[in-house]
Image: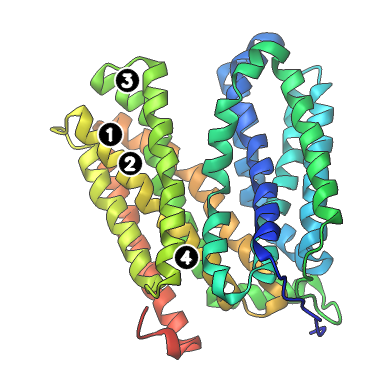
């Protein structure tokens, strides 16, 4: 391993906030498509099924490219990968502005998705290098909020669509991405571990694939993502059909509940910093998901109770990503394989995103809305087995932390 002259930043929080901002800028690119679906559909004459792929493209890319992008991040360095990811998203957004049809726009969404994966894989490694031990868990908790924070901000920017239309919105995001890439490239950040001599990619892939740590993180992220999107993916429709809410009101209720996951992220960071064991937090998160899922889709829950349980469900789910990001450096086979380890987690998360809504829709169509509760409980029980493996792995590698796990 190359010996790094790591500098302790006298003021680490500005660097952490800068890295966090890169994740937020990336999340805008996911959210902008959701906001602009109606305009894109009308202008290009697309079907609903076709236009929905503009959103799903990010999940497909993440499910396929997480590990390969992680390998390149370990070789290039996390900062180069993050800057390259922002530039790639900017290029995709710029060319998407000029797209004349669905095929070209979808191709540019794939380009944006690749850049997004690069930023998400690089972010935790950059924070791990920039944040001293005293604030690292809080910094990782902040990083875990980039998605709910960014999605909330982009929703607040929705009035701009009426002023500049979707192509102008794409162009505005292009300028933001290029500006942020320059800012990240020029700012002082500590280097991240890189191998002294590059091994063959297949060797690094094998070293990661035979290690239980990355698979454990992928299982945790996949379980959380599948349960989360099984619930929230269909929540507006569920509230509309069961409680008679308008589509707009159901969407606002769902958005408010989703925002609670950010508070769960921050709370988990505080709890980890105060000595709460990560295994206990994982069990608490998945237990909360299971219990709240039963209440939300139970046949006798009134609207106020269902909404309150959605808030708690989202909060509980927010505990899980923070533990995953915080544990990734310790469960990576080698320090210079942190990127590919996070890539495993990303692929698990995106596979859960792809699987959760169709599974929930299938069981609801076959057995009614209440059957989604059974699905969520089943996912949580499977996750409990993965949590047990997580605890065993941490206890074996770090016996000093086993007592508080």
User: Is there a contact, CB below 8 Å, between mark 2 and mark 4?
Assistant: no
Mark pair 2, 4: CA separation:
20 Å
Quarter of the image where one finds residue 144? bottom right
The tag on residue 311 is 2
Give the side of residue 346 with respect to residue 76, left or right.
left
N-term mark: 1 or 4: 1
Q: Is residue 36 visible?
A: yes
Mark 3 highlights which residue? 240
Q: Position of residue 232 (x, y in %)?
A: 40, 37
Work out which quarter of the rendered image holds the C terminus and state it: bottom left
Q: Is residue 226 above or below residue 202?
A: above
In the rendered image, which residue does mark 4 sit on? Answer: 323
Q: Is residue 241 found left or right of 149 in the rendered image?
A: left
Q: Nearer the viewer, residue 130 or 126?
A: 130
Rendered image: mark on residue 307:
1
* Mark sitting earlier along the chain (3/2): 3
Contact check, label 1 and label 2, Cβ < 8 Å: yes
Work out whether mark 1 precedes mark 3 in sequence or the reverse, and give the earlier one.
Answer: 3
SS for dot 1:
helix
Q: CA distance from mark 3 to mark 4?
A: 34 Å
Apparent side of residue 107 relative to residue 276 in the rendered image (left or right): right
Marks 1 and 4, how far apart at CA: 26 Å
Frontmost residue, 13 versus 304: 13
The answer to which of 263 and 299 lies nearer the viewer is 263
Marks 1/4 in contact by CB < 8 Å: the verdict is no
Q: Which label belongs to residue 351?
A: none
* SS type, badge 3: helix
Classify mark 2: residues with Cα within 10 Å, few (<14), some (14-19) or many (20+).
many
Q: Mark 2 or mark 4, which has the lower sequence index?
A: 2
The answer to whether any part of residue 66 appears in the image is: no
């Amino acid at each position: 391993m190359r010996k790094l002259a790591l500098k302790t930043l006298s003021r680490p929080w500005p660097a952490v906030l800068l890295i966090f901002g890169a994740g937020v800028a990336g999340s805008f690119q996911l959210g902008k498509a959701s906001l602009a679906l109606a305009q894109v559909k009308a202008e290009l004459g697309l079907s609903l099924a076709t236009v929905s792929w503009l959103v799903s493209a990010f999940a497909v890319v993440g499910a396929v490219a997480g590990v390969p992008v992680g390998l390149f991040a370990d070789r290039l360095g996390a900062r180069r990968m993050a800057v390259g990811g922002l530039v790639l998203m900017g290029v995709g957004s710029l060319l998407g502005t000029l797209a004349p049809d669905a095929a070209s726009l979808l191709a540019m969404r794939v380009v944006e998705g690749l850049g997004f994966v690069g930023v998400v894989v690089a972010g935790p490694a950059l924070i791990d290098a920039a944040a001293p031990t005293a604030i690292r868990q809080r910094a990782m908790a902040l990083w875990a909020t980039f998605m709910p924070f960014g999605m909330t901000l982009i929703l607040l920017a929705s009035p701009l669509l009426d002023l500049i239309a979707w192509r102008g919105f794409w162009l505005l995001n292009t300028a933001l991405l290029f500006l942020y890439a320059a800012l990240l490239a020029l700012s002082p950040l500590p280097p991240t571990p890189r191998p002294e001599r590059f091994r063959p990619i297949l060797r690094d892939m094998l070293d990661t694939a035979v290690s239980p740590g990355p698979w454990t993180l992928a299982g945790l992220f996949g379980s959380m993502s599948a349960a989360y999107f099984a619930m929230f993916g269909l929540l507006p429709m569920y509230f509309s059909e069961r409680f008679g809410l308008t589509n707009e009101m159901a969407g606002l209720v769902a958005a408010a509940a989703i925002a609670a996951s950010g508070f769960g992220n921050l709370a988990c960071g505080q709890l980890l910093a105060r000595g709460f064991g990560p295994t206990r937090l994982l069990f608490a998160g998945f237990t909360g998901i299971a219990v709240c899922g039963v209440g939300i889709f139970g046949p006798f829950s009134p609207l106020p109770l269902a909404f309150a349980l959605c808030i708690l469900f989202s909060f509980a789910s927010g505990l899980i990503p923070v533990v995953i990001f915080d544990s990734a450096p310790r469960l990576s086979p080698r320090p210079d394989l942190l990127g590919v380890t996070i890539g495993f987690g990303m692929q698990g998360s995106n596979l859960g995103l792809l699987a959760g809504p169709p599974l929930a829709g299938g069981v609801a169509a076959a057995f009614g809305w209440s059957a989604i509760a059974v699905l969520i409980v089943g996912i949580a029980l499977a996750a409990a087995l993965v949590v047990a493996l997580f605890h065993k792995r941490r206890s074996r590698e770090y016996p000093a932390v086993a007592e508080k796990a």
